[in-house]
Image (cartoon, rainbow, N blue to C red):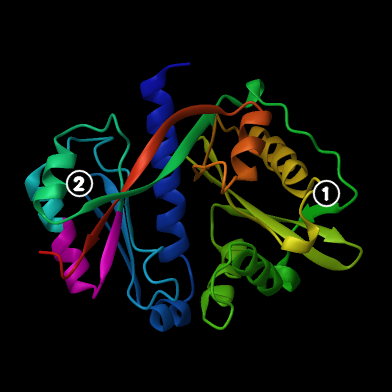
Amino acid sequence: MDGHEAMRAAELGEAAYMEAAFAGTTAEMKSALRMSTARIGGDVVTVMADDPTGGFWSRVIGLGITEPVTASVVDEIISFAHASDASSLVWQIAPRAGGPWEELLAARGARASAAWVKFAARPQDLHADASTDLRIAPIGAADARRSGEVMTEGFGMPMDSDLPTWCGTLPGIPGFRAYGAWDDDELVATSCLFVSHAIGTLCGAATLPAYRGRGAQGALMARRIADAVDAGCEWITAETGTETPEDPNPSLHNMRRIGLVELYERRNWIWSADSE
């Protein structure tokens, strides 16, 4: 597997689905959460000025992949953040991205933080386990709102906010395909596939705590991979957080188990508006 090509697919696939999630949602959600997005220097910048999580959704993704990171690009991104009332930005830059980006970010007050793990593979190299006692099916309009609630609760994000409504708009955004796992008539897990430029990105996967360990995510991966193949995807990509013995991450093991190749750990850099 070509490492540079895999990195390009992994980073640009993630950038594309984040851009679509912000730009493609409803005008009501954009206003309620004060959402904005821009493409600067070949990357995607998303800002959620009223983020109930305190900063998870304001991000810089894909920088240094299609063109090197420069001081002028970093400063343009920061100017956009200020204009959009972002209190902070999470810079998610691949370790082999072009340009002296670590030096540039540190000079502007950004600090290294937690890391995510990036994965990619060719579809023919994957072997997801579809066995589960839950029913797996696409999420239609009638279940979209509930899928947003499951996603928000599954990720441990604030339920008393506009996030469940926003997440519930994803199934209706072009490029997204949403899937759920049901226990009888109750939706207990959800996930998305985003397809763009022959890249299928596995994203937005969450299971309610009481229903974990029943194979929901493995089965949802199998369904999404099959549909990505049918859509002509040449790459399957995903990302998740790192783990420690004290804080294991089942998603990390699920991705390894199905054959996704661990490309690299990508360190988050946090820039705060008051750090300059």
- Give the side of residue 250 with respect to residue 21, left or right: right
User: Mark 1 or 2, which is nearer the eye?
Assistant: 1
Query: Is disc 2 placed on a helix, strand or loop?
Result: loop
User: Per the image, is 79 magenta?
Assistant: yes
* Residue 1 seen: yes
199 displayed left or right of 72: right
Residue 128 percent coordinates (x, y): 73, 32
Q: Residue at x 68, y 35 (%)?
A: 230
Closer to the N terminus: mark 1 or mark 2?
2
Is 235 placed above or below 141 here?
above
Is residue 64 placed above or below 149 in the rendered structure? above
Residue 245 is marked as none
Q: How many marks?
A: 2
In the picture, which quadrant includes the C terminus? bottom left
Question: Which residue is at 41% across, 76% downward?
Answer: 30
List x then y, in percent, for residue 124: 65, 22
Residue at horizontal 70%, vertical 72%? 146
> At 54% from the left edge and 57% from the top edge, which residue is drawn?
174
Which amino acid type corresponds to the residue marked 1 in the rendered image?
Arg
Image spot of residue 21 (x, y percent)? 47, 61
Residue that carries the numbered disc 2 in the rendered image = 41
Image side of residue 182 versus residue 192, left or right:
right
- How packed is label 1: few (under 14 Cα within 10 Å), some, or many (20 or more)? some
Q: What is the span of residues highlighted in magenta in the rendered image?
A: 77-90
Query: Element under label 1?
Result: loop
- Name the amino acid type tagged 2: Gly
Q: Nearer the viewer, residue 212 or 25?
A: 212
Question: Which residue has dot 1 on it?
Answer: 214
From the viewer's perspective, is residue 259 above or below residue 16? above
Q: Residues within 10 Å of mark 2 (few under 14, many from 20)?
A: many
Is residue 249 magenta-colored? no
